[in-house]
Amino acid sequence: MKQPQLILSHTLVQSIMRYWDVWSIKIRISILTIDNGVFEVLATNGDTHLGGEDFDQRIMEYFIKLIKKKYSKDNRALGKLRREAKRAKRALSNQHQVRVEIESLFDGTDFSEPLTRARIPKVQQLLKDYFNGKEPNKGVNPDEAVAFGAAVQGSILSGEGGDETKDILLLDVAPLTLGIETVGGVMTKLIPRNTVIPTKKS
């Protein structure tokens, strides 16, 4: 649950929640129900070849064309640009414009350019349209979501969560099909994607 996420249709008593994460390494969507503290993941899917790093790369390409300098072999400059592209991408989730500023990007030259989010809200609008006009809930702080979830799950597993976590149960699924390689390099499926876990098969 890294990076900005969008959550729709969430109520505490009973609901179907769709979790959409578009800014991390891959695009991922999970559908789950929440009923009296039971979080049941119904399905999860994603595209490992499309995600936040693709946005970072496009931002980098935009700036490289903008300054018309060839430093594709300057790993230090590219590293600086990549870090700023990620920072700008995250900032554009909540701001209309950011300024990308890098001191001494190359040859002692400073870099400073504005970047607007003309296309960033498009993903949110597509989700809103797809789910019949329901507004995405962006109330979850993406920088804290993973740590918070891990802390809650850790307190449940250790039995030290107290009253706040005693009624919480997470029923998760395997995000990918699991199998073994058999004769001829063929994968034999053992546990299909979206099987409730933990599970076992022999």
Image: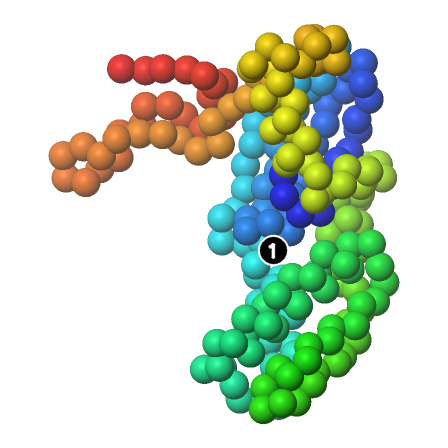
Q: For numbered disc 1, what is the local secondary structure?
A: helix
Residue 160 placement (x, y as % from top left):
63, 12
| Residue found at x 78% / y 54% | 93
Q: Is residue 185 above or below residue 96?
A: above
In the figure, residue 199 lies in which quadrant?
top left
Residue 175 placement (x, y as % from top left):
49, 32
Can residue 92 be seen in the rendering of this structure? yes
The quadrant of the picture occupied by the N terminus is top right
For disc 1, the neighbor class at 10 Å (few under 14, some 14 to 19, many from 20) is many
The residue that label 1 is drawn on is 52
Foreground pick, 186 / 116: 116
Q: Is residue 26 above or below residue 82?
A: above
The quadrant of the picture occupied by the C terminus is top left
| Residue found at x 60% / y 55% | 52
Q: Is 168 displayed left or right of 15 in the figure?
A: left
In the figure, residue 50 lies in which quadrant?
bottom right
Q: Is residue 79 above or below residue 197?
A: below
Residue 62 placement (x, y as % from top left):
65, 77
| Residue found at x 55% / y 78% | 77
Foreground pick, 201 / 155: 155
Can residue 58 be seen in the rendering of this structure? no
Q: Is 193 displayed left or right of 41 in the figure?
A: left
Count of marks placed on residues:
1
Residue 16 placement (x, y as % from top left):
73, 23
| Residue found at x 49% / y 18% | 196
Q: Is 81 displayed left or right of 89 in the figure?
A: left
In the figure, residue 89 lies in which quadrant?
bottom right
Q: How is this picture coloured? A: rainbow
Check the image and name the residue furthest to the left: 183
Question: What's the residue type where badge 1 is placed?
Answer: Gly
Q: Is residue 78 above or below residue 48?
A: below
